[in-house]
Structures are given as C-alpha cells and as structure tokens.
Amino acid sequence: MQNLLLLGVSYFFYAWWDWRFLSLIIISSIIDYIAGLSIHNADTDKKRKSWLVVSLIANLGFLSIFKYYNFFAESFTQAVSAFGWQPNDLTLNIILPVGISFYTFQTLSYTIDIYRKSFEPTKSVLSFFTYIAFFPQLVAGPIERASNLLPQIEKKRSFNKEWFNEGLLQIIIGLFRKIVIADTLAAYVDTIYADPSIYNSSTVLLATFFYAFQIYFDFAGYSDIAIGTAKVMGFKFHQNFNLPYFSKSLTEFWRKWHISLSFWLRDYLYISLGGNRKGIKITYRNLMITMLLGGLWHGSSWNFIIWGGIHGLVLSIEKYMKSNPKFNFLQKIGFFGFPITFFIVLIAWIFFRATTLNSAIIATKKILLFKGGIPFIGDINVLANSLFVLTIGIAFDYFLFKKNIALENFGKNFTPLKIVVFCSILIIFINLFYSTSNNFIYFQF
C-alpha cells in the first residue's frame, strides 16, 4: 500500500508538468523491467547481451530524439552549408521532457548492473516502477542506484523521528541555498551574461564568480531538498555534493561535485571503455570521451561539449603529472591547488552559462586577457544582497569543511528546539528574499 501511494504521488508530480510525457517514463519502466528479468534468466551470453542492447537502444533512443535530434540536425545543416548545399529545415518542434537525462541514467544503471551480475532484478512491478519514478529525485537527481534504493522501497517503512528532523532541516537548508543565495546571485549574472561583450573584464569576472556559486547553491540546494524529502519519508539517498570548491585538484572536484553523476560516468562509461587498464594513452582517450559525453549529457550544444572537453583535458594533465616523478614537488605546495582548481572550474563555467559559443569566447577572452576596470554596479541593492548572501553561504560551507561535517549529518545531534530555532531563522531569510523564484538550473537537463 505504501508503494502504491508513493507511485501514484510520483506520477501525479510528474504529470503536473505535462501528463503526455508520463508515458515515456512508463514505457521505459516496462522495457527495463522486462529486460532486467530477461537478462537475469537468459541461459546464454548472447541472449543476455541482446536484452541489454534492447534496454540501451530504447532508453538512449528516447534521449537522443527528445534531447539531441535538433542539435545534430542543426550541426549537419551548418556543416553541409559550408559546401554550398542548403537543405530544408530538418529540425522538429520537440519539447524536452523534464528529468529525462536523470531517469534514463537511473534505469540504465539497473539493467547494466544485472548484466554485470552485480545486482539481481526485482520481481515486483510496483517496486520497480516506484524506483524509476520516485518523485524527490525524478527530475534532477541524485541518480540513485537500484542496489541502494530498491531494497528500501521493498521493505515496510515506519516513522523515524530522528530522520524526520534531519530531513526537515536539510530541506530548509536546501530552500535557503536555492531561494536566498542562488536566485539572488542570478539577478546580477543574468544581466551581465545577456551580452558580456558590452562589459569590462572585472564585470565579466565578477559575474562568472557569482555564477560559479549560483549553479552550486542551486543544484546542491535541489539535492538537499530531494535528499531531505526522501529522509522524511524513510529513505536514505547517497550524498550528492561534498563541498566541491574546497578541492586541491580537478580530480578531487569530481569526487565532490554531482557525485551521483560522476560515479555513474566512471562506473558505466569510463570503466566500460577500458578505464586505465589498457595503457596511459588509452586512459587519456577514455577520460576525454567520458567528459565530452558528460558535457553533452548536460545539454545539446557545443558549449557543453567544450565545457566537458576542458575538464577532460585537465583531468588527463593531472593524471600525467601524478604518474611522473618530475612533478612530485607539487605535493609540497598543495595549498595552491585550491585557487588553481577553482580558477579552472571558473573558466569552464563560462561555456556552461553563456547562451552562445560566441558569447562564451568573448567572456573567456575578457577574463584571460584581463584589462581591469571597475565592475558594473547597476542596482546597488542587487550587488549588495549578492555579496551578503554569498558570504553567508561560503562561511557555512567553510564551517562544514573545517569541522569535517557532511551536511547530511549537520543536524544529527540537534535537539528539537535547536532545529526549530535554526529552521525559523532560515525561513525568515527565505521570506525576506523570495520574490519570483527561478526554476532550478538542472531542470533544463
């Protein structure tokens, strides 16, 4: 009865956006439920592989049509136009279903794990459909593995006071991060990135700095809400963000940023390509392919591919330097890894935020060929509020970093009174700063 209610609520939650695309989730669920059982029960490797291919083609086919068809059609048109051929418009008027990238990866991990014999399929249709559609993380993650979430779905759940309190606290912190910090920073960022060509280097740098924290607090905030909501209902998700800007290398950054995605890319793409088992050159190739496709997963444009390429290139350089004794001296100046890593991430974010490739190139040149100048002020209240809330957000993260506390455990030893007081303060801030809240950034992916 619990799962039937949960599935109904999850389908209603998604259908509230557009009921027509609910059919995609149901079709994917049917295909992968059958594929999972068929892979497990197949008596030959050929049959097992055939059913895995069915799952891959179906899920990646849906994703390709709805998310990437127009991108490849436009790229093809531009390419052939260079040779004088002007084909008819090949694009389609397609709406991108919310969350398709997330639930596609989640359901694929299920069939791949069964194929690898690391997980046994569930026989319960209700449990599996609930696993795919579970509403807290349906539209923007975290991408939960079946090995973690399905066993929790299949057992009876009872009210847990401690989990309820901890989950409620994390929900409020997530709302604070999103509404108070991310949405406040967005006002300045959106103004500058509407046309970065008309602003000086200092302005573009400040806007990019703000965006680095806007996207972090926006997405980490959503993850907090999802993890907290699940915990209130008796489910425990894995951590999805672990103070990523306190990283001494890009390798460390990807162990802390969007953890569920980075581990998915590692386990199901990088390792499948051969990982680091086939020599150093193949390792570099695998890193680049993984990050380029990771960029494409985020969005159907060359900006995202370049963003992934920057990360792939730097990850390859770091791996080379780590394996070469000539660079051992860098371990003695490890502190400088923090600002260097943050600057690399900052430059890459330009391509993530800019609306066009040309705008991204302009913004990058303005920062790398820095010419100074006084940053654009505009509405002084917007800038002052941005600096104020950003200071709060960074100070809280620094506290967690110095105390080595995961946000998921922040309220573990809080008394009910302390939770009420802390949440009340955050709610006051949320009400003070709330105007028209923006959509979560990752909803577009």
Image (cartoon, rainbow, N blue to C red):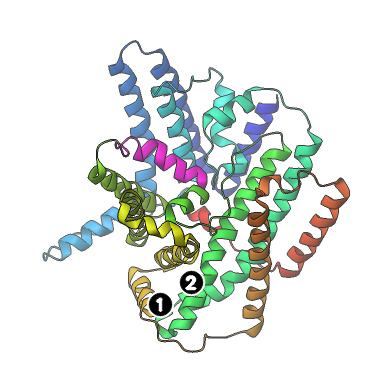
Q: Residue at x 70, y 49 (%)?
A: 170
Residue range of the region highlighted in magenta in the rendering = 258-276
User: Mark 1 or mark 2, which has the lower sequence index?
Assistant: 2
Amino acid type of the residue that numbered disc 1 sits on in the rendered structure? Ile
Q: Where does residue 340 sit, x and y in percent of width and height?
A: 44, 65
Using residue 265 as the reference point, say whether residue 222 is left or right of it.
right
Q: Main secondary structure of the magenta part?
A: helix
Identify the residue shown where x is 58% and y is 50%.
242
User: Distance of mark 1 from mark 2, alpha carbons?
Assistant: 9 Å
Label 1's element? helix
Outermost residue on the bottom side: it is 373
User: Is residue 27 visible in the rendered structure shown here?
Assistant: no
Where is residue 374? Give x, y as percent: 51, 89
Q: Which residue in the structure is indicated by mark 2?
A: 208
Picture quadrant where residue 87 is located: bottom left
Q: State the residue position of label 1.
A: 367
